[in-house]
Image (cartoon, helix red, strand yellow):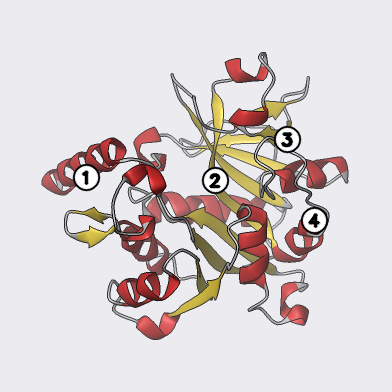
Amino acid sequence: MQRTLRRRTESIDVNQHLSGRRMSAIVLAAGKGSRMQSPLPKPLQLLDGQPMTGYVIKALEGLGVERLIIVVGHQGSRVRDALLQTTNDPSGLEFAEQKVQNGTAQAVAVALQLLDPNDLEADDNNVMVLPGDMPLLTTCTLAELKELHFASGAAATVLTAEFTDPSGYGRVVRDEQGQIKRIVEHADALPEELTIGEVNTSVYCFKSGLLSSALRDVGSANAQSEYYLTDVIELLTTSGNDVLAVTVDDSDEVRGVNDSQQLAECELLLRNRSDVK
């Protein structure tokens, strides 16, 4: 199933399912950021004087999520202390520690351990997962992603983007009917899959019970020997669950930051956005 945040027509009736109105959020901020070549851990790289992951937290605070969990790892205590300074409500942040950085699936599993098992399995409970290195994401985009997820009744809703150069990003693989089938990471993609222009932004909404169940079946037989959160998408679709793909209108919002050049580019875009306001 496909939809865009520009409200293009797509194959589902978004008014069909209106249940499931609870949403928590998990921000993945455990990475070291070796390519930054900086003593600062990746989540604390500065944009306009503020830690990068702080912008993600602010976008989520505007969304009004039920619980906001930050997964830390490398220099976890330092990251935690710094991120608590970025919010007006430090008591609203919770932290989970990923002691071994062995993949995004494991990071999410660590965060889910903070939720009550009965609450996790509740039919109306959902969780948004997003990276801590995407500082240009807006509350508006996240709010529409959340509402489309609720309205569709999908097991998962994936925020995707169209890039002229999709190098490094996971590709969204669809079947003959145009339905999302799976996400393949760049390192594991076949030559024909590398030609796909639609990419995974690593921003998702899930029904929490289905996510928790699927995570138990994620393996590490891949090019990086890691537990990929993206594998959950194929596990859900092959089990007969609906997965919705939502394409973001402004691809600048979903720029990730992996090196100093990308950091500088995002800072320029952030300042230009502030100038417009």
Q: Which of marks 1 and 2 is nearer the N terminus?
A: 2
**Which residue appears farthest toward the bottom when viewing the image?**
91
Q: In this view, does 180 lie above or below 25?
A: above
Q: Would you say the residues marked 4 and 3 are in contact, meaning their CB atoms lie under 8 Å apart? A: no
Q: How crowded is mark 2: few (under 14 residues within 10 Å), some or many (20 or more)?
A: many
Residue at numbered disc 2: 202
Residue type, numbered disc 3: Arg
Q: Do the residues labelled 3 and 1 touch (CB within 8 Å)?
A: no
Which residue is denoted by mark 1 in the rendering? 267
Give the CA separation, mark 4 to mark 3: 14 Å
For the residues labelled 1 and 4, say whether their Cβ atoms are less than 8 Å apart.
no
Q: Is residue 124 above or below residue 205?
A: below
Q: In which quarter of the image is residue 26?
A: bottom right
Label drawn at residue 182:
3
Residue drawn at point x = 72 percent, y = 55 percent: 17
Cα distance between the residues tagged 1 and 4: 37 Å
